[in-house]
Amino acid sequence: MLPPAPRLTGPHANQQLIVERERAGQFAGDLTAQVKFVSLQPEIAAVTPQGMVTPVKDGTATIRGEVDGHVVETQVVVTGAQGIEPWSFRHDVQAVFTKTGCNMGACHGAQAGKKGFKLALRGYDSPMDYNTLTRQTRGRRVNLADPERSLILLKATGAIPHGGGTRFDEDTLEYRIVSEWIAEGAPAPRDDDATVTELEIFPRQAVLPMSATQQLLVRATYSDGRQRDVTRWAKYTSTESGVAAIDEQGKVTVTGRGEAAITVWFASRVTVGTISVPNEKTVPAEVFANSPRANFIDDLVLDKLRRLNLPPAGQASDSEFLRRSFVSTLGVLPTADEAREFLADSHPDKRSRLIERLLERPEYVDYWSYKWSDLLLVSTKKLNARAVWSFSNWVRGAVETNRPWNQFAREIITASGSTIDNGAANYFVLHKDAKLLNEATTVTFLGLSINCAQCHDHPLERWTLDDYYGMANLFARVRSKNGDVDGESIVFPVSTGDIPHPTRVGSPAPRPLDGTALTHDDPRDRRQHLAQWLTAPENPYFAKALVNRVWANYMGRGLVEMVDDLRATNPSSNEPLLTALADDFVKHGYDVKHLIRTIMRSNTYQRSPQATAENAADDRFYSHYPVRRLSAEVMLDALSQVTGVPTEFPDYPKGLRALQLPDNNVTSYFLSAFGRPAREFTCECERSAEPNITQTLHLANGKTLNEKLKAPDNVLKRWIDEKLTDSEIVDRIYLGALSRFPAPAEKERLVAALAEAVAGAADDTAKATARRETLEDLLWAVLTSKEFLFVL
């Protein structure tokens, strides 16, 4: 019976009870509708047939439930049952406005309000809302002499025209709360009102069959120790409505198989529950027991798959693993010779040895420097050319030396001095405003977006106005000035300057999001305090943010998706795995190469992309490797590599690859068409992997690929000059583009097509022309195939 140990405090208190079926230590179904409830001390607490408990007088009562011959009991403690307790504006009236949508962004919670009536979004500012209701429009919204004539009630019930329609009826608890609050004199919110300190959801996890329903309960605990059933007043959303839909009263209906997170919001607090709906067909236990396990990643992924009845795919082929590893780690394809050598290697540890070689190659530096430069917005759109080279070289140096990620972040956050001598200082030229620095830093290093809290308490997170401006004030005393050298800036801290609070007098003390505040007169560079909090091992966001980014690079999607959105209301698809990866990352000194090595060695990373009928719908739990398209830069470099024709970039030397460009503000139709990020905003969402007709047409008819195929000095010309046979050329095309040999049937068909193309030629010149054109067509077909354009 849930919730455990219920307490009823005050005459208005109530508590819904639910009874759960338990199977193998998991909640497995809601039995409440079948239960016969009875209070053994009805003089203390009453219970309805539906399981709603209400207070009668102080004391302890036992509530018993009987179902299918089973008996469950819970003890209910009642206090203050016969006292007089007016409705609270902060706790009760605003809860009504939130639940009925009055203070949502689409209604009066909008930034400008609606028709002259503005409420704080989701009730984050009680004093402001109280003033708006009781003082504006000459007090017409609240009629103390005749509560039923209050405008707030007349409009909400539809008694007079209201643009938002009827929000509640006169015979509802919502009407009773607001009308009785007005009748009691509309008491104002008090500074010492208790606040919500904890929000709980029951059951927190449940495993349900198809078409099942599950009533959730939500309990709030307040700073004065009071507990309250807020199921009626909470707001609910499901991350996967195709798996579990939820209504306004917290009732879940199973609609599909998989797993859904149920997010619950009440009074600026958020909690999350999970509904799992396994596949109907049980996977034999030995499938999971016999599945290869290289490290803890496999243990935790297989545990999730087992609970969802998702069978794991087998191991990827050597060619799939080889190509996947090169693209994910270096951003280049293995050459035909590298592919041939790896495929011929019979050593059992050849994959582990390949991983170590890749981590030491210069292309590793190119790829990860470019990736971090995307994140840090290194571009001449906001920096001059000297600054871009300085910042880019600093990032490359950090990657080349495998600088620990905590040190990487600390050096950026605390950077001072010349932007030419210290490239990291350009971070403060890119983001000169303290608020912009605040927002960029939280996204970059914490995976959190707190922009909403600049204007109001965050509607989907715990962050408040005070949190936002306290964090921003850690950057408020950073300045920059022109240096002695052209293109140089000097970044330095000062001892004065704070950002005022937007809604009240004064400035919030400089404080990391949930860290310790500094006093305003503390003489230290505030960024040192921020860096210490940011990179502390106990910081719950820092390591997870980086781990999630790296995981997404290797697995096609983050454990939290989108990767810049690590808020509580966007939970991980495998929270134990994310936590274990972050802990391991911290334990090994924030070593990025160690993290990469751990992921690549796992059987999860080395899993086949081939789905089965039982796991084909899985796109979040890694039962098979997620197929994804090559990124714009990797694809362009791959086309150049396979054809042997480098792409030329204006003002850069010939042969420089796209991933070696220090500045992405370089004109390239191909890169723009295939989703290169603009580096204007700190967000992974700038990069697009979505297919579109422009990409299709450009690959088919555009200049980029076709000019490379027809180039007089491309790889086809060299192979022909070397007098390679058609069979040898087909092998090289497949090895260079797809990292595999052609299947016998493929090879037979292609060699025959080449022979047929030259069979009717009149002379040697015509034969050579026909052969060259057919080889161009063959290479074009391979380079526009899904197998080439995607990471398998």
Image (cartoon, helix red, strand yellow):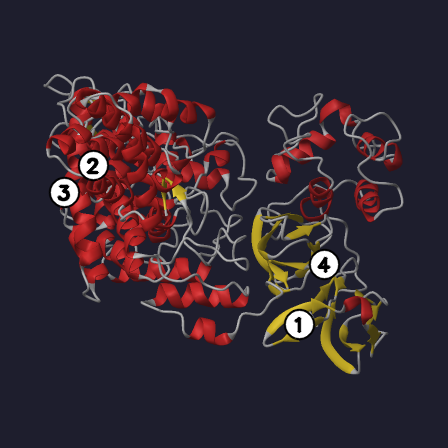
Cα separation, mark 2 vs mark 3, equals 27 Å
Residue 58 falls left or right of residue 340: right
Three-letter residue code for mark 1: Ala
Can you give x and y, in whole percent of width and height, for residue 595 in the image?
27, 56
Cα separation, mark 3 vs mark 4, equals 54 Å
SS at circle 4:
loop
Residue 480, quarter of the rendered image:
top left
Mark 4 or mark 1, which is nearer to you? 4
- Which circle marks residue 5 in the picture? 1
Name above or below for residue 745 compared with residue 9.
above
Residue 695, quarter of the rendered image:
top left
Cα separation, mark 1 vs mark 2, equals 52 Å
Three-letter residue code for mark 3: Pro
Q: Which residue is label 2 attached to? A: 415
Q: Earlier in the sequence, mark 4 or mark 2?
A: 4
Q: At 46% across and 25% down in the image, what residue appears?
A: 693
Mark 2, Cα crowd under 10 Å, few <14 / some 14-19 / many 20+, is many
Q: Which residue is label 4 attached to? A: 211
**Image marks 3 and 1: residues in contact by CB distance under 8 Å:** no
SS at circle 2:
loop
Residue 389 falls left or right of residue 232: left
Mark 2 or mark 3, which is nearer to you? 3
Can you give x and y, in whole percent of width and height, for residue 335 in the image?
19, 43
SS at circle 1:
loop
Foreground: 322 or 68?
322
Q: Earlier in the sequence, mark 3 or mark 4?
A: 4
Can you give x and y, in whole percent of width and height, for residue 770 in the image?
26, 24
Q: Earlier in the sequence, mark 2 or mark 3?
A: 3
Mark 4, Cα crowd under 10 Å, few <14 / some 14-19 / many 20+, is some
- Which circle marks residue 362 in the picture? 3
